[in-house]
Amino acid sequence: MRHWALASRDNATQPFVVIDKQRARLWLFDGEGLPLGDTPVLLGAAKGDASVPGIGERPMEKILPHERTTPAGRFLAEAGHNANGDDIFWVDYDAAVSMHRVRAHVPAERRLQRLATPTPADNRISYGCINVPVAFYNNQLKPTLLGRRGVIYVLPDTMPMDRLFSPLPASIAGP
């Protein structure tokens, strides 16, 4: 994805993020494509590549488990704040999907432990937001994206890559 973004000039020299949902991992790059770091992330509890229409207008308690997806695609990061006043980066404002620090307020969810495991199998827990470890968010993501536009590429779970990012070289487009 990094090579495609640079070769196609899709990022237009803006810093960018690549999120691989299957690996539950985030990679951060500067505008020239130099790696700035990577980290595990928590993602939407349900597999899927699109948000349910109108989901951003519903209260969280009305969102069903199968609707808790992290949408795939190309998004422009926009700094903002959530309802609690915490700084976040909007991924898809209309769907209420953002990238933010992991919140470990519900011990039974074991969010910090999930981030620490070596497998992505347990990194699906959010309502669709991308939960980033606090230190990575504060020390790498925020300084890179704050005050400028950045691009967020969220790779799909099931949809072919070339349906979202085109044209892709055959080596990464898949079957």
Image: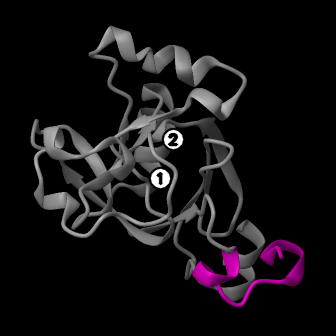
Q: Name the residue under label 2.
A: 140
Q: Residue at x 24, y 64 (%)?
A: 93
Q: Are marks 1 and 2 in contact (CB under 8 Å)?
A: yes
Residue 26: percent from left, percent from top: 60, 46
Residue 60: percent from left, percent from top: 17, 42
How packed mark 1 is, by other alpha carbons closer than 10 Å (few <14, some 14-19, many 20 or more), is: many
Quadrant position of the N terminus in the picture:
bottom right
Quadrant position of the C terminus in the picture:
bottom right
Q: Which residue is drawn at 50% across and 65% down?
A: 72
Q: What residue type is labelled 2?
A: Gln
Left or right placement of residue 69 versus residue 161 in this view:
left
Q: Residue 144 carries which label?
A: 1
Q: What residue type is labelled 1?
A: Thr
Chain part drawn in magenta: 161-175
The correct choice, above or below, for 5 with respect to 107 in the image is below
Residue 149: percent from left, percent from top: 39, 69
How packed mark 2 is, by other alpha carbons closer than 10 Å (few <14, some 14-19, many 20 or more), is: some
Nearest the camera: 55 or 147? 55
Residue 18: percent from left, percent from top: 60, 58
How far apart are the two marked residues, 1 and 2, measured between alpha carbons?
6 Å
